[in-house]
Each structure stands twice: as structure tokens, then as C-alpha cells.
Image (tube, rainbow, N blue to C red):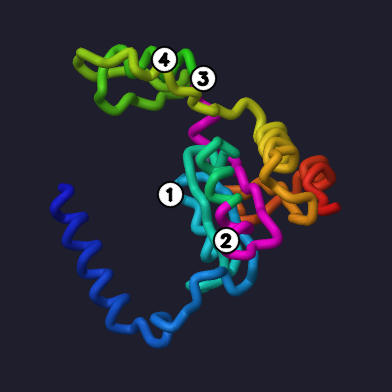
Amino acid sequence: MSNTVLQEVLTANRDYSANFGKKGDLAMPPARQFAVLTCMDARLDPAKFAGLAEGDAHVVRNAGGRASDDAIRSLVISYKLLGTREWFVIHHTNCGMEFFTNEVMRGLLANSLETAALTEHGFHDIGKGPGSRAGEFIEWLTIKDQAQSVRDDVERIREHPLVPANIAIYGYIYDVKSGKLLEVAEANKIGKAA
Ligand SMILES: [Zn+2]
């Protein structure tokens, strides 16, 4: 199965590279001077939903689009070395991060290292052990409420000592049913550039 994916990706890349055009001349700093922090969810394509071309913007992705220490590391590099001035924090409806807690994730991992099943009652482990308790040491940054998580993350970035006040931070929720970006007004207020 994975070999099929490998072949598909390499074939797609040959086509992409064959039509690469002038993209080899793009500068390193994002031409449109902005960055997007969003979830790794496969249904989200920031290049499409936000109209990005190669060279336009930084896109930082992780599970949930959360303002983790590592996401903040990337954003600081994004402005300090590469000149971005505006940042978007975009979480989304039906995010997988709403379907578990730290405790659940740690339990699933302690049980087995196989993929769990998602049922209407949440994730259930169906794998054979042994698992590992190493999940106890990770904060999984799960989400209870999307508007709240966007607000929390914009606030965390806004208040970070390495983030200057003149960077505008916008908070949005992407609706996976319509493709629309829905504003989180309170997050935008917190994120306003000074
Ligand atoms: Zn997600």
C-alpha cells in the first residue's frame, strides 16, 4: 500500500517539476509578508482556501493548528528573519483534536501503538499491546471549543515576549462543510496590532 503512495507521489512530483517555470527564482522571504498557523487536517489546503502561490506566505501546520512552543518558534523566525507582518491562526470545524483529551490519548497509547478506531463515542483502542506510557510526558493540546482555542492561541502568541506589538494576528475558524473562513471576533480584538 505504502509503495503505491510512494510511486504516486514521485510521479506527481515529476509532473510538477516538469512545469516548474520561473519558481526557481523565487526569493526566500514570503512575498506577501504573512504567515498562517493551521491544523494538519487533510481536508484543509491553505494554498487553495487562502489563495496562496509558491513564495507568497509561510504555512505552519500541526495537529489542531495550536500555538505550541514549536509553532511560536516558527512564527518568530517568520518575522524576525523573513519579514512577515501579519499572522493568521486558523482552527476548523470537526477537528480531530476535539475528540479526545490528554487522558484518553495517554490511555490509548499505553494500550497499544496501533491506530485506534473512531466511533460515535470517541476513539477506542483495538490494537494488540504492548503500548507505551511515554504519552504521559506530552501535552497533546486538545480542543474543547474552537472559538476558545483560537482565542487562547492568539492570546498566547500576542503575549509572547518575542512577538512584537506591531504584528497583526487574526483568528478564524475554517468550516469544513463550506470551505468558508469564519471570523472569531474576540480573537481578532486580542490580536490587533498596536
Ligand atoms: Zn484539525
- Report the mark closest to the observer, 1 or 3: 3
Q: Which mark is residue 136?
A: 4
Q: CB under 8 Å between callouts 2 and 3?
A: no
Q: Residue at x 54, y 60 (%)?
A: 58
Q: Which residue is mark 1?
A: 42
- Report the mark closest to the observer, 2 or 3: 2
Q: Earlier in the sequence, mark 1 or mark 3?
A: 1
Identity of the residue furthest to the bottom in this view? 21
Q: Earlier in the sequence, mark 1 or mark 2?
A: 1
Kindly state the secondary structure of the residue where label 3 is placed. Answer: loop
Q: CB under 8 Å between callouts 3 and 4?
A: no
Question: What amino acid does circle 2 point to?
Answer: Leu
Question: What amino acid does circle 4 point to?
Answer: Glu
Question: What amino acid does circle 1 point to?
Answer: Ala
Q: Is residue 116 left or right of residue 25?
A: left
Kindly state the secondary structure of the residue where label 4 is placed. Answer: helix
Res. 177 visible in picture: no
Residue 116 in picture, x, y percent from top left: 32, 24
- Report the mark closest to the observer, 4 or 2: 2
- Range covered by the magenta-colored residues: 77-100
Q: Is residue 105 above or below residue 26?
A: above
Question: What amino acid does circle 3 point to?
Answer: Thr
Q: Earlier in the sequence, mark 2 or mark 3?
A: 2
Res. 10 visible in picture: yes
Q: Residues within 10 Å of mark 4 (few under 14, many from 20)?
A: some
Disc 1 versus disc 4: distance between alpha carbons? 27 Å
Q: Is residue 7 left or right of residue 46?
A: left
Q: Which residue is mark 2?
A: 81
Residue 173 in picture, x, y percent from top left: 66, 46
Q: Is residue 27 left or right of residue 193?
A: left
Q: Is residue 104 above or below residue 86?
A: above
